[in-house]
Amino acid sequence: MKRTILTLLAALLCALSFAQEKTTYLVAHRDTCDLYMDVYEPVAIPGDTLDRPTILFVFGGGFIMGQRDDPWVMPWFKLLNENGYRVVSVDYRLGLKGVRMRFDLFHLIQSANYTKKAVDMGVEDVFASVRYLADHAEELGVDLDNIVISGSSAGAMISLSCELEACNRTSRAIEYLPEGFHFAGVMSFAGAIMSDSGRPAYQRTPCPQLLIHGTKDGAVAYDKMGFGRWGMFGSSYLVKEVLQPAGYTYQIYRYVDHSHDMAANMLANWPEEKRFLEVSVIGRKPLVIDCTVDDPTMPVLGSASVTLDDIY
């Protein structure tokens, strides 16, 4: 198969060499844990006049594991910092930790319900971090009108749902957000929107979205997974049925024969991220890209075919 296989161990060992300085802040107290955020400051670029956004990152891990300072993501944070972007990496409660997930016909609705609750919990916690940034914007140097939310896997699901809630303002979690708040962009690495009310719809125009996804993702739906009013609506479905028909701004990169490994390929996708940030977010140009990529040099981190049964 056309791919370069890199072992997860090698990736982690490489990541450890990129340890970075950070400042940690307590965001909120929860019954089960305290929520923190780490802030990584950008490198000053001589002569740079671009109004670069803050990148708010939400980690992945199937809602059962992961942490805001996972070693493997440090090289990407470093790359963002070196290109002038502040990174804020945040906590959220792991809503499926300790929950028995089953995907046979008799338990699909139950597992979907568990997942939706985990996403909603994550949205609430991420919005608490946005509230903290709003309350401390001056001391942190954060422009509240210029925040791009990004996430990997479960974090990408939370990120996409955060933008949906910011547009629709239908949940209690919206109470955390300052009046009139909106994200400047979303970068989703193998994400989807979990819905218990059918196809997602935006009540106002969403911010530009960058969607990176493998066409054979067995963990987070590339297209759609579910039935009835329940569904996991992946990148391809969102473009085809929601973003494109309404004329919203998006860029999607569909990686042929790749599975859930695209949740961890932020470094390899830097050229696409850079263009998205500079053109769609900073430049505010309504550039739409729909690209199918068959690239034998795209690395695969860890298993090439992670499924839900592998995770749970």
Image (spheres, grey):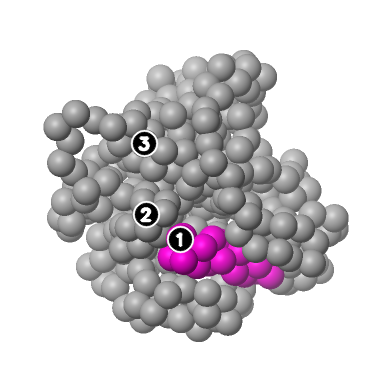
Q: CA distance from mark 2 to mark 3?
A: 12 Å
Given residues 125 and 254, the one toward you in this image is 125
Is 270 in the magenta? no
Q: Secondary structure at mark 2?
A: loop
Q: Could you tell which of marks 1 and 2 lies nearer the N-terminus?
A: 1
Q: Main secondary structure of the magenta part?
A: helix
Q: Residues within 10 Å of mark 1 (few under 14, many from 20)?
A: few
Expressed as whole percent of the image width and height from the top left, the position of residue 36 reads 63, 52
Asked if the residue under mark 2 is in contact with the one under mark 1, i.e. CB atoms within 8 Å, the reply is yes
Asked if the residue under mark 3 is in contact with the one under mark 2, i.e. CB atoms within 8 Å, the reply is no
Q: Secondary structure at mark 3?
A: loop
Q: Residue at x 44, y 43 (%)?
A: 87
Q: Amino acid at mark 3?
A: Pro
Q: Which residue is mark 2?
A: 142
Vertical comparison of 56 with 125: above or below: above
Given residues 212 and 56, the one toward you in this image is 56
Expressed as whole percent of the image width and height from the top left, the position of residue 158 reads 55, 60
Mark linked to residue 136: 1
Quarter of the figure with residue 274: top left
Is 126 in the magenta? yes
Q: Which residue is mark 3?
A: 42
User: From where the camera sits, is residue 197 visible?
Assistant: no
Q: Which residues are magenta?
A: 116-136
Q: How many marks?
A: 3
Q: CA distance from mark 1 to mark 2?
A: 8 Å
Asked if the residue under mark 3 is in contact with the one under mark 1, i.e. CB atoms within 8 Å, the reply is no
Q: Amino acid at mark 1?
A: His
Vertical comparison of 22 with 127: above or below: above
Q: Amino acid at mark 2?
A: Val
